[in-house]
Amino acid sequence: SSVLLSVCVRPCMAPCGTCVLALLLLTLRISAEQRRWNTFYDILGLEPTASHQEVQRAYRRAALLEHPDKSQRVDAEERFRRVAEAFEVLRNAERRHWYDDELAHGGDPRNGNAQDMSSSAAHDIFKNQFGSVYEHWQPGYKVEGDVILNNK
């Protein structure tokens, strides 16, 4: 994914409010992007009740769409890897059962039951870390550019 990011170009000994706010907004944007492909079912465009044959068809379709040789996306290799990972789990009845059980209990089977950070939790972390700098930020010089995000 690429996002437009504004950052302060003043030399800072500590993060200024503009930098902190930009980082917070980028963190929230990354979180929203990750939620779009939150589960293996989302990756393959399936419902959790999909049959084995539907999983195979969805994998073939997604693999063709996301293959690095076919896709123009910058993150095509990562997306293709995630399609393959989703298929490896969902095509195997035992792995799929474990995966479904983890999802049913509110966990994320990919990273040990980690939960998404809410925006208020992110706000509290930045406020505690940067205090008044974060609360009373003043805009500095801005530079715009594309930032390529690699979720590895």
Image (spheres, helix red, strand yellow):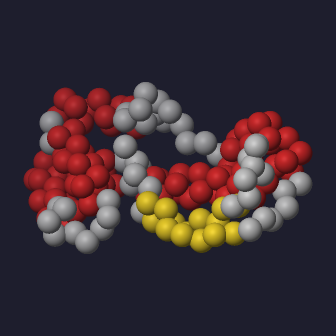
Q: Nearer the viewer, residue 147 or 94?
A: 147
Identify whether 75 is placed above or below 110: below
Q: Is residue 115 left or right of residue 38?
A: right
Going 22% across and 31% down the picture, which residue do you hit? 95
> What residue is shown at x 40% (from left), y 48% (from top)?
151
Is 25 on the left-hand or right-hand side of 133?
left
Task: Kindly indicate the quadrant of the structure image that contains residue 92.
Answer: top left
Please state the horizontal and vertical placement of residue 58, each as a whole percent of the image.
18, 59
Residue at 17% x, 40% y is 88
Q: Is residue 132 left or right of residue 6?
A: right
User: Could you tell me which quadrant the N terminus lies in?
Assistant: bottom left
**Which residue sits furthest front?**
11
**Residue 105 picture location, percent across and down:** 46, 32
In the picture shown, does residue 140 fall above or below 49? below
Q: Nearer the viewer, residue 79 or 118?
A: 79
In front of the other: 26 or 110: 26
Residue at 69% across, 44% down: 122
Q: Is residue 107 visible?
A: yes
**Could you tell me which quadrant the C terminus lies in?**
top left
Residue 30: percent from left, percent from top:
52, 54
Q: Where 98 sits versus 71, above or below?
A: above
Can residue 28 be seen here? The reply is no
The answer to whether residue 4 is above or below residue 41 is below
